[in-house]
């Protein structure tokens, strides 16, 4: 994702960076999406990831939801989408 040098390498920092995924002036991502577009994160073999790393999988889902919630709460639009392939519950 090419986060900025000051990136804190934790989920709070990830949330902060992803919140501005469509704001090039914020300089939170090296290649932000255009304003109003969605940044799609793709997880291949999602079932395997969910089984191997259940805490990380849950945290990722919660953080994506929080980023979008945070933006909607201030009158914006969601910025993240998640494409999960191979997910079977």
Image (cartoon, grey):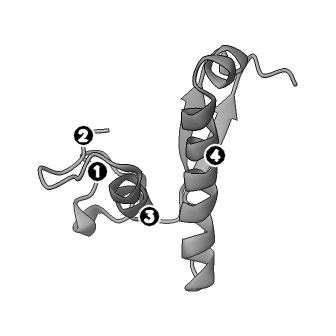
Residue under label 1: 29
The alpha-carbon separation of the residues under discs 1 and 2 comes to 6 Å
Residue under label 3: 19
Judge depth for marks 4 and 1 and give the one in front. Answer: 4
Mark 2 and mark 4 in contact (Cβ < 8 Å)? no
Question: First in sequence: mark 3 or mark 4?
Answer: 3
Quarter of the image for residue 83 reads top right
Quarter of the image for residue 57 reads top right
Q: Is any part of residue 75 visible from this angle?
A: yes
Q: Which class describes the residues within 10 Å of circle 4: few (<14), some (14-19), or many (20+)?
A: few
- Viewer-proximal residue among 73 and 50: 50
Helix, strand or loop under label 2: loop
Judge depth for marks 4 and 2 and give the one in front. Answer: 4
The alpha-carbon separation of the residues under discs 3 and 4 comes to 14 Å
In the current view of this chain or complex, which residue is farthest to the front? 55
Q: Quadrant of the N terminus?
A: top left
Q: Residue at x 87, y 25 (%)?
A: 89
Q: Which mark is residue 61?
A: 4
Q: Is residue 23 above or below residue 73?
A: above
Mark 2 and mark 1 in contact (Cβ < 8 Å)? yes
Helix, strand or loop under label 3: helix
Q: Is residue 73 above or below residue 87?
A: below
Q: Residue at x 14, y 55 (%)?
A: 6
Q: Which class describes the residues within 10 Å of circle 2: few (<14), some (14-19), or many (20+)?
A: few
- Viewer-proximal residue among 23 and 57: 57
Q: Which mark is residue 2?
A: 2
The alpha-carbon separation of the residues under discs 4 and 1 comes to 20 Å
């Amino acid at each position: 994702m090419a986060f900025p040098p000051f990136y804190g390498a934790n989920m709070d920092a990830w949330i902060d960076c992803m919140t501005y995924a469509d704001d090039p002036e914020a300089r939170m991502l090296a290649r932000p999406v255009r304003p109003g577009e969605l940044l799609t994160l793709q997880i291949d073999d999602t079932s395997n990831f969910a089984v191997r790393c259940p805490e990380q999988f849950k945290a990722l889902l919660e953080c994506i939801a929080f980023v979008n919630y945070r933006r909607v709460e201030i009158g914006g639009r969601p910025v993240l989408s998640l494409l999960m392939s191979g997910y079977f519950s």
